[in-house]
Image (tube, helix red, strand yellow):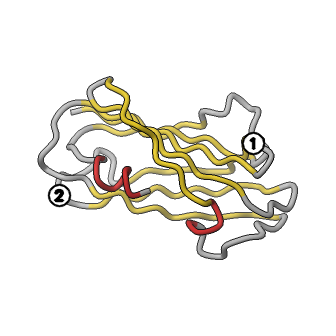
């Protein structure tokens, strides 16, 4: 998430979507991104609520970014380290909160894609946020 925090920065209109095309193991129950549009110099909050049908012992979280339609190298983190409860992720409902700071220095459009995979590379969840000045 370090790359995401460092680069997710501009004022504009945001939208959050499930980018899994229905193939993820976790099923998103609800998601929100606020404030929408983001406020320059303040954090926006991404809330996700998911149904977890099977226990997960570990995996990765990949954060991909595009800035003015130019891809930035993705950042990959240990999934267990970014979740407050760590691992295993147990069967049931999983609620997450992510704070994303929006810096005043960048202008244009930004796309953020968050993709979680388990240790055998199965997609657990995929969410995208698209923001534009």
Left or right position of 23 against 9: right
Q: CA distance from mark 1 to mark 2?
A: 36 Å
Q: Nearer the viewer, residue 3 or 52?
A: 3
x and y percentages locating residue 38 in the rendered image: 27, 49
Tag shown at residue 41? 2
Left or right position of 75 against 121: left
Tag shown at residue 121? 1
Residue at 26% x, 26% y: name it: 68
Q: Is residue 97 above or below residue 73?
A: below
Residue at 81% x, 64% y: name it: 92
Give neighbour class at mark 2: few <14, some 14-19, many 20+ (Cα, 10 Å): some
| Element on which disc 1 rests | loop
Q: Residue furthest top?
A: 69
Residue at 68% x, 50% y: name it: 29
Question: Where the N terminus falls, by quadrant?
Answer: bottom left
x and y percentages locating residue 69 in the rendered image: 32, 23
| Element on which disc 2 rests | loop
Q: Residue furthest right?
A: 54
Q: Residue furthest left?
A: 105
- Which one is earlier in the sequence, the residue at label 1 or at label 2? 2
Quadrant in the picture for residue 132: top left
Quadrant in the picture for residue 57: bottom right
x and y percentages locating residue 117 in the rendered image: 70, 47
Tag shown at residue 89? none
Are the residues tagged 1 and 2 within 8 Å (C-beta)?
Answer: no
Residue at 51% x, 64% y: name it: 97
């Amino acid at each position: 998430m370090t790359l995401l925090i460092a680069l997710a920065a501009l004022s504009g209109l945001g939208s959050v979507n499930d980018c899994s095309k229905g193939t993820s193991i976790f099923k998103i129950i609800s998601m929100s991104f606020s404030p929408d549009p983001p406020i320059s110099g303040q954090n926006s909050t991404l809330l996700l609520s998911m149904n977890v049908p099977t226990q997960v012992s570990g995996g990765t979280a990949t954060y991909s970014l595009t800035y003015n339609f130019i891809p930035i190298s993705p950042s990959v983190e240990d999934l267990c380290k970014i979740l407050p409860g760590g691992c295993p992720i147990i069967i049931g409902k999983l609620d997450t909160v992510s704070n994303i700071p929006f810096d005043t220095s960048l202008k244009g459009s930004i796309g953020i894609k968050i993709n979680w995979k388990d240790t055998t590379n199965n997609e657990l969840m995929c969410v995208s946020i698209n923001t534009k000045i």
